Each structure stands twice: as C-alpha cells, then as structure tokens.
Image (cartoon, rainbow, N blue to C red):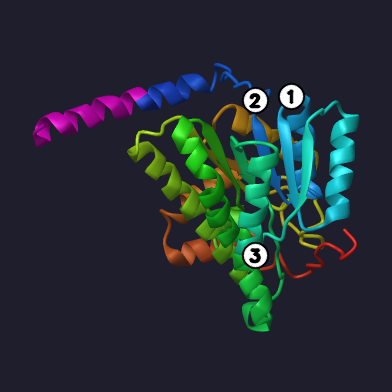
Amino acid sequence: MNFFLETLQVMVLSIYYLLEAFVKLFIPTRRKNVAGEIVLISGAGSGIGRLMSLEFAKLGATLVLWDINQEGNKETARLVKENGGSRVYTYQCDCSNKTEIYRVADQVKREVGDVTILINNAGIVTGKKFMDSPDDLVQKTLEVNTLAHFWTYKAFLPAMMASNHGHLVSIASSAGLIGVNGLADYCASKFAAVGFAESIGLEMLASGKDGIKTTIVCPYFITTGMFDGCQTKWPRLLPILDSSYAAKKIVDAILKEQVYLVMPRSLYFVFGLKNIVPVKLGLLLGVYFGAFNFMDHFKGRRKND
C-alpha cells in the first residue's frame, strides 16, 4: 500500500474510532461472563486483593488466592465461602522469590487447572526518601511490584496462548504514570509494571492472540492501609479512594475488557497536562496539587495487618 492510501486509511479509521469511543460514553458496555474462569489474585490476604476476591466469588469464578500471609489468605477464603464462593484455593507464596512463584504456579496447574484471569495485585512500599531506603527494601520493592509480574506471566501465559483465551491484569498505580516525591523506588517499580503490561499486550496482538486481554489499573491512594498517613491537598479534586469502590471499579473494568483504568477520573486530565505543558508549569501544578507533600505523614500498614 502506498503512502497516500495508507495515510487516508489511518485518517478514516481514526475518525471511526473516535466516534465509536464517543458513542460508548452513552451506551453501556457489555460485560463478559467469568463464571467458571480460574482467577488468580496475588496479594489476596488483605486490602484490594481480598475485596476483588469477594467480587469475583459473586460472579461464579474459581478463585486461586496467593499471599505471603497465610492467615490473612485463609480469612479471605472464609469470607469468600460465606459470600457464596464454592471453589476457592489458597496458596502461600512469597512474590519476591522467583523460584517460589514457579513452584506454587506448578502446584496450581496440577491441583486447580490453567489460570485464565491473572491479577498481579501484590505490592509493597517503603515510604522513604530514596537515599534513606535500605538496599534490601529497594530490591524487594522491585521484586514484588515488577519482577513477580514477569515470572507469573512466564508461568501462566503459555496456556492462555495455546487456547487464545485469557486476561492479564496489572494493578499498578498512578505513581506508575507520574513521579512522586518520596516514592522513587515505588514509582520505578510501577512505571516498569505499566510498561511491561503494555508491551506484553502488544506482543499478544502482534502474535494474533487477540483473545488474550490486558487491563492496566492506575489508581490514586486507596484506603487499604498500605498508604496510611498520606494526605491529599484537594480531596474533592483528588480524593483518597474508598477500597470497596476501587475494587468494584477494577472488577467492572475487567468484565468490560477495559485496557486502562485510571482513578479518580480527574487524573486523566492531570496526566494529559503532564505531556503538553512546559516543565516549569508542570512543577507549579505539582505544587498546586500537593504532589511534593503526599508522603510527608506516611505511616504505612501495620505489621499485624
């Protein structure tokens, strides 16, 4: 195809896709049926992982719950069964350990079957300035928040590709789209998680595996305890998200096969500005939105959580 014809094709399709997106703002998107799907959720022992587990249980999915906290994981399983979940399996897994991820993944495939919806949710945060962060915690942040995604994809993606059916979900962060003062290692890990998920999504499309969907979730702070003490300067503009609300939105995005979910919606505007305004204006807006002080009163999740 020559340059003129290909350019014309892109222009016509661009208009079509823009109109399609506009129409979808007013027409409810069809949700897929996940009954019988095998859904693996890492970090299921508390917070968003637990709440997503409860949502998927209501939809008839088979649940595979991973967490390093065995007691928390068992409590999630108990709550799932109380809420009507009939097939739920718990596994203790340290997501910072590649060997353990592969070992537990093999156990899941033997005992439950091939995972069809993989939700990489496990995450940790040091909450310290970079030069104050111990090397071992920086390394663990990258291992849990980023490298664990590599190893779970290696473990479960081949079966999805063989059947051209599956869904890869990355619970990243708004800190994976814009830098935040006091979160250098966390931001690095989440930027990497977003880039990795996007790239694998493109690999699947280029390989003709269009039955394997990707959802990348980039929320602001959520009331799970992980970022206890963090403050938002303008709560009406950038609210700290209620955990139940966030879990429902994430599950709904998966059901709609939505590629990106950014919460709250005001962040779409913030990220758009980041890419078009001068650097000095971007810094000014950062001060206005309180981005330099989000972590000033960080406490984080208590050990017994």
User: Above or below — where is 189 with respect to 89?
Assistant: below
- Residue 126: say if magenta: no
Mark 1 to mark 3 CA distance (whole Å): 31 Å
Residue range of the region highlighted in magenta in the rendering: 1-16
Q: Marks 2 and 3: CB-CB under 8 Å?
A: no
Q: Amino acid at mark 3?
A: Asn
Residue at 51% over, 51% down = 154
Task: Please state the horizontal and vertical placement of residue 206, each as a whole percent of the image.
Answer: 33, 39
295 left or right of 80 in image: left
Q: In this figure, what is the number of numbered marks?
A: 3
74 left or right of 222 in image: right
- Disc 1 marks which residue? 60
Q: Amino acid at mark 1?
A: Gly
Task: Please state the horizontal and vertical placement of residue 251, each as a whole percent of the image.
Answer: 67, 33
Q: Which mark is residue 97?
A: 3
Q: Which residue is nearer to you in this view: 97 or 8?
A: 97
Circle 2 or circle 3, nearest the eye:
3
Q: Marks 2 and 1: CB-CB under 8 Å?
A: yes
**The quarter of the displayed image where residue 129 is located:** bottom right
